Amino acid sequence: MKPTLIEFPAPLNSALEHLAQQTGRSPLELIQEAVEIYLSQQNTPLPPSIGMGASGRTDLSQRNEELLWQDRWLALLQQVAESEQNYATGNTYRGSVADLMAELDD
């Protein structure tokens, strides 16, 4: 081990000495353990899921239903636009449910 000089304010040094007497451990052992714990917490990467749902919206919890319906409405409008485009290009045709059922029976 490499020796390192650490200076503590008097109250911190007294608390360290008191803890060492209570636990039966040396001040050196207590300091080493504290530094190891501190360093292990500093190097712990955050889970990849942290921030995944960051929308940038500050009102999301108050407006969640409205925003969900808005997203659904926009998706439906997109589907209608695609259907109209398919119909215009001849990829689909419009008919009644009865027409569909008759076609399935054939």
Image (cartoon, grey):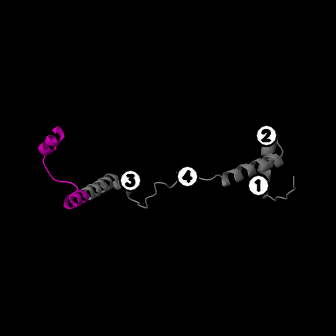
The magenta segment is 80-106
Q: Secondary structure at mark 1?
A: helix
Asked if the stretch drawn in magenta spans residue 94, the answer is yes
Q: How many marks?
A: 4
Image point (76%, 54%), residue name: 12
Does the residue at mark 3 contact the one at mark 4 (Cβ under 8 Å)? no
Question: Which numbered disc flags the more N-terminal residue, 3 or 4?
Answer: 4
Does the residue at mark 3 contact the one at mark 1 (Cβ under 8 Å)? no
Q: Secondary structure at mark 2?
A: helix
Q: Which mark's residue is nearer the viewer, 3 or 1?
A: 3
Q: CA distance from mark 3 to mark 1?
A: 47 Å
The dominant secondary structure in magenta is helix
Q: Is residue 51 found left or right of 46 in the rendered image? A: left
Front one among 66 and 105: 105
Question: Which numbered disc flags the more N-terminal residue, 1 or 2?
Answer: 1
Q: Which residue is mark 2?
A: 23
- Residue type at the position of mark 2: Thr
Q: Which residue is mark 1?
A: 11
Image point (13%, 45%), residue name: 99
Q: Which residue is mark 3?
A: 61
Per the rendering, the mark at residue 48 is 4
Q: x and y percent of residue 78 in the render?
A: 27, 58
Q: x and y percent of residue 38 in the render?
A: 70, 52
Q: Is residue 15 found left or right of 93 in the rendered image? A: right
Question: Which numbered disc flags the more N-terminal residue, 3 or 1?
Answer: 1
**Which quarter shows the C terminus?**
top left
Image point (18%, 40%), residue name: 104
Q: CA distance from mark 3 to mark 4?
A: 23 Å
Question: Which numbered disc flags the more N-terminal residue, 1 or 4?
Answer: 1
Q: Which mark's residue is nearer the viewer, 1 or 2?
A: 2
Q: CA distance from mark 4 to mark 2?
A: 39 Å
